[in-house]
Image: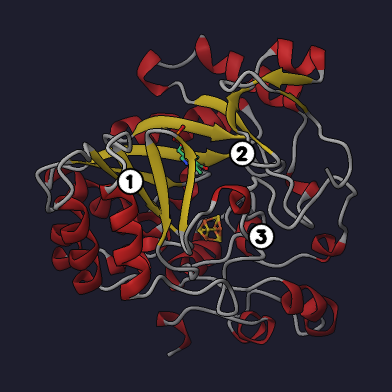
Amino acid sequence: MVKDKTLRSIEDLVAAGLLPAAALAELEPVAEQFAVGVSSQMAAVMRSRDPDGAVRRQFVPDRRELTVTPAERHDPIGDDAHSPLFGLVHRYPDRVLFKLVSVCPVYCRFCFRREMVGPEGDGAMSDEDLAAAAAYVRARPEIREVILTGGDPLMLSARRVRTVMAHLDAIPHLDIIRWHTRVPVVAPERLTEDLVAAVSRSDKTVALAVHCNHADELTGPAEAGLRALRRAGVMLLSQTVLLKGINDSVPALETLMRAFLRLGVLPYYLHHGDLAKGTSHFRTTLAEGLDLVEALRGRLSGLAQPTYVLDLPGGAGKVPVTRELIAQGGVRTWTGDWHAYPPEAGS
Ligand SMILES: *Cc1c(COP(=O)(O)O)cnc(C)c1O
Ligand code: SF4
């Protein structure tokens, strides 16, 4: 039964009726460069309730991905510059990332780590990697938060999640464990009782930032999964990527933020599109993004206002997008350093 399986190739998408046969030759070069993955849940949405193609365009490969602009790069947010151990990224003094796995339930065509994720990506952290990362945190009391990411960390089994949580729970100075995942939305069937219990079982504050870009992604099972996490005491936050032709309109963003709030998910970040290779057709300008965010101010509860941020290339971190940043062509970050944006090609 094709329906219950992740579609992993152009051939699979053609067989599932989501692409015409003619797409095989046309899109194969795209699939050779970037992983393809459409979960059964997202395939079902595309078939039944995707009037504007807002879901389809996030996951179905497109010829335009072969166009790489001079500013685009392999590691758009500069993770490599701050990675002292395999899988660990330490950019800010008080928090670190663990990139637990490099696989995802879907492969988003705009992914900021698109050259690191997928079946041929960086790979998962082993037991030794995990122990080394935990020891790194344990030795640094200034680290208060561990962010579990990937790929998608909820691709792990409940058993593996319990192991990760046990490592972190044993570090006294940690206050917060934060999951970054797309699973509750795109593969809600993974959120079994066992997995929800494993994700939430800690005396520390457990937060979960769910990646979702359009209200049409939020199916009944996704809503049920988010409710289960909330009942388990998880602090739910949202993460949305601003995407041209998908959610770059006031109604699309307003509907999405209202849906988050209704589900007990506090809107956290609206990300400006990163300079990942072959993603220019998804990027708005900063000014367009700022206009949208300002329009939301008058329309939505203060609780439903995401912060519009840009992750600076080279590893300098996230900064809020402002009129000053746009006018000055750059920004001074918390370290006092000046960073131009857009960056010079290849820098
Ligand atoms: C985004 C990110 C974080 C988290 O930043 P917040 O602003 O706390 O959400 C932490 N470390 C790295 C390397 C990041 O890219
Ligand atoms: S789920 Fe996240 S890491 Fe995975 S492909 Fe999508 S954007 Fe990239």
Amino acid type at mark 3: Arg
Front-most of residues 93 and 119: 93
Label 1: which secondary element = strand
Q: Residues within 10 Å of mark 3 (few under 14, many from 20)?
A: many
Sequence-wise, the earlier of marks 2 and 3 is 3
**Label number found at residue 59:** none
Query: Which dot, 3 or 1, sits closer to the camera?
Result: 1
CB atoms of marks 3 and 1 within 8 Å: no
**Label number found at residue 109:** 3
Q: Residues within 10 Å of mark 1 (few under 14, many from 20)?
A: many
- Residue at x-position 57% and y-position 26%: 308
Can you say whether 281 is above or below 307 in the image?
below
Amino acid type at mark 2: Asn
Q: Position of residue 239 (x, y in %)?
A: 46, 40
Name the residue tied to disc 2.
247
Sequence-wise, the earlier of marks 3 and 1 is 3
Q: Position of residue 141 (x, y in %)?
A: 27, 37
**Label number found at residue 146:** 1
Q: Residues within 10 Å of mark 2 (few under 14, many from 20)?
A: many
Sequence-wise, the earlier of marks 1 and 2 is 1
Mark 2 to mark 3 CA distance (whole Å): 15 Å
- Extreme residue toward the bottom, this view: 1
